[in-house]
């Protein structure tokens, strides 16, 4: 699902398109102590970040639609649905967990052709989180506990797609490098996603709620 969304937004339709967060600035590359209670720049603190957050999938759906609209009319008509639940846990000591039971679907039509794609994700992800200034990184992601199924059609004919992976599930995979802004009730992660090195990056906002 992520591959099709990014390919459509960036104009890359090659078979090797993948999702990648851009490399954070040098200041963000330094790993901070996740137990540090001192305020940091950018409207986010470790104290605010810690705990459980629910990914606002309705906001993600709206942001994806805006991405396609800003890409121009050459993308054709697009309909996107993101549903279910995804929660992120930022624990003491830097442990990260995502619990996922969600799905995403896209229908794109233009020039007499209709492409559909669906992705279903259930299970969990684990990793490590670190905050440096307002830059949040999530590393050492283990998606062994996540089950992803994908399907697609072209003009009603079923496509042969490879076995699903975490990278196919945009509603499940957290951004590995993002700019964070946190309040008592809302956490916003802004990431730059790129299908490959030759394509233009697109900005994606992940909104999470308490």
Image (cartoon, helix red, strand yellow):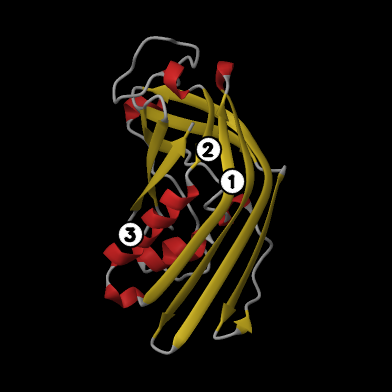
Q: Can residue 68 be seen in this view?
A: yes
Q: Are marks 1 and 2 in contact (CB under 8 Å)?
A: yes
Q: Is mark 3 on a helix, strand or loop?
A: helix
Residue 76 percent across, percent down from the top left: 36, 77
Q: Which of 152 and 3 is in front in this view?
A: 152
C-alpha span from label 1 to label 3: 21 Å
Q: Residue 199 carries which label?
A: none
Left or right of residue 163, residue 15 in this image: left
Q: Which residue is drawn at 72% across and 42% down?
A: 145
- Which residue is disc 1 drawn over? 85
Q: Residue 54 carries which label?
A: 2
C-alpha span from label 1 to label 2: 7 Å
Q: Report which quarter residue 73 is drawn in.
A: bottom left
Q: Report which quarter residue 154 is drawn in.
A: bottom right
The first of marks 1 and 2 along the sequence is 2
In this rendering, the answer to whether 137 lies above or below 67 is above
- Which residue is disc 3 drawn over? 66
Q: Is mark 1 on a helix, strand or loop?
A: strand
Residue 143 percent across, percent down from the top left: 66, 43
Q: Which residue is drawn at 37% across and 61% down?
A: 65
Q: Which residue is drawn at 43% across and 20% down?
A: 48
Left or right of residue 88, residue 177 in this image: left
Q: Which of 132 and 16 is in front in this view?
A: 132
Question: Are there few (<14), some (14-19), or many (20+) residues within 10 Å of tag 3?
Answer: few
Q: Nearer the viewer, mark 2 or mark 3?
A: 2
Residue 114 percent across, percent down from the top left: 48, 82
Residue 1 percent across, percent down from the top left: 54, 62
Q: What element carries label 2?
A: strand
The first of marks 1 and 3 along the sequence is 3
């Amino acid at each position: 699902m992520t591959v099709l969304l990014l390919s459509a937004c960036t104009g890359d339709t090659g078979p090797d398109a993948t999702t990648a967060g851009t490399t954070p600035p040098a200041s963000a590359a330094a790993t901070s102590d996740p137990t540090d209670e001192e305020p940091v720049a950018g409207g986010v603190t470790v104290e605010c970040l810690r705990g459980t957050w629910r990914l606002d999938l309705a906001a993600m759906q709206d942001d994806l639609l805006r991405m396609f609209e800003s890409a121009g009319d050459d993308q054709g008509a697009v309909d996107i649905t993101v549903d279910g639940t995804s929660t992120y846990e930022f624990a003491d000591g830097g442990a990260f967990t995502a619990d996922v039971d969600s799905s995403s679907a896209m229908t794109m039509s233009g020039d007499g052709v209709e492409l559909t794609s669906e992705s279903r994700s259930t299970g969990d992800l684990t990793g490590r989180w670190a905050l440096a200034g307002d830059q949040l990184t999530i590393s050492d992601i283990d998606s062994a506990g996540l089950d992803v199924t994908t399907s697609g059609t072209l003009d009603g004919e079923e496509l042969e797609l490879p076995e699903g992976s975490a990278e196919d599930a945009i509603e499940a995979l957290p951004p590995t490098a993002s700019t964070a802004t946190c309040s008592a009730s809302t956490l916003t992660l802004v990431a730059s996603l790129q299908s490959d090195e030759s394509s233009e990056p697109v900005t994606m906002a992940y909104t999470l709620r308490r």
